[in-house]
Amino acid sequence: MAIRKSKTPQSPTQRADQKRIDILKSAAKCFRKTGFHQTSMQEICAEVGLGPGAVYRYFDSKEAIIAAMAEDERRQARTMLAEFHDTEDLPQALSAITRAFAARYAAISDAGLMTEIYAEGLRNKRVGALIKTAETDWVDGLAEMLCTAQERGQINPALDAQQAALLLTAMWDGLVIRQAYTQALPAEMLELFDDMLKRWLSASATAASPKRSKPAPAPASAPTSAAAPVVAPAPKAKPKAKSVEAEPELALALPVVDNMTLQVEMDLRQMSLI
């Protein structure tokens, strides 16, 4: 006698959670096809296979649906950061995050949907507030990871962790948007990104920029002759006597000048004589 396997009954909460997930998936599918503003609630109901009353029980508008999508993004971002928080190799963890984003938004439609949600956040205060909160949580969490790595001597201690986290986030966002036009990021690009991160975050890197050497000032006691002008480097040097006779006012007008200033004035004068 065959034994029929019965499904484990779901609790009301589990059923509600599953319906919510189904509605969000169906809405995302509609948004990918026609865009957020062009999609109607009726189309979402038809896609999920539920009546308007059932859908409105969970989401009272398209705005509420896209806000829920933004909140889900925030929750998943927190989970990802928690995964890598205590890593012993931060550059490797950042590389894994890069590849996770690339894989998640590999499809043009997924990258486009993420971009549309962010664009809606600029127009809609409620969605914008959720996205801002999600972004703040993400950047702060990433900055905390960087600070921990600095304390352990894993990365350059001179970096501003908050600014570095913001820059990394902008770079990842750029990669995602780029995938809307380049469906699959070449492996070479991801390897180049990894190499760039390792060089930038290297613990041996110094924050101080190399000092530029300044030319030594001329001694204050150096004698200056009004009759003999300072000679700047030139392809063909003119005889000193002719220079004095041809331009007697020049030496008198410029008693003490540096070589560069005199050269510019001489060049301008020569141009005016052509």
Image: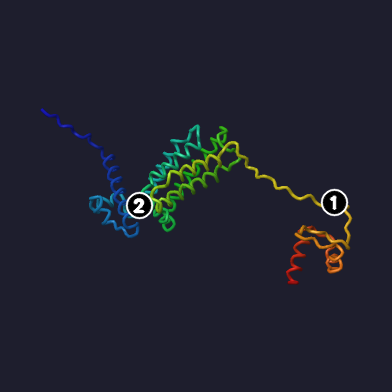
Q: Which mark is residue 219?
A: 1
Label count reads 2
Residue 262: % across, % down: 78, 62
Q: Is residue 61 above or below residue 2?
A: below
In which quadrant will I find the N terminus? Answer: top left
| Picture residue at 49% right of the left edge, 48% below the top | 171
Q: Is residue 201 above or below residue 70?
A: above
Q: Is residue 73 left or right of residue 199?
A: left
| Picture residue at 58% right of the left edge, 42% below the top | 159
Mark 1 residue element = loop
Residue 136: % across, % down: 48, 46
Q: Amino acid at mark 1?
A: Pro
Query: Which residue lies under the disc numbered 2?
Result: 109
Among the two numbered marks 2 and 1 on one chain, the one whose residue lies closer to the N terminus? 2
Which callout, 2 or 1, points to the residue nearer the camera? 1
| Picture residue at 44% right of the left edge, 41% below the top | 97
In which quadrant will I find the C terminus? Answer: bottom right
Q: Is residue 63 left or right of residue 164?
A: left
Q: Is residue 186 left or right of residue 163?
A: left
Mark 2 residue element = helix
Q: Amino acid at mark 2?
A: Ser
Residue 100: % across, % down: 41, 41
Who is closer to the viewer here, 159 or 238? 238
| Picture residue at 76% right of the left edge, 50% below the top | 215
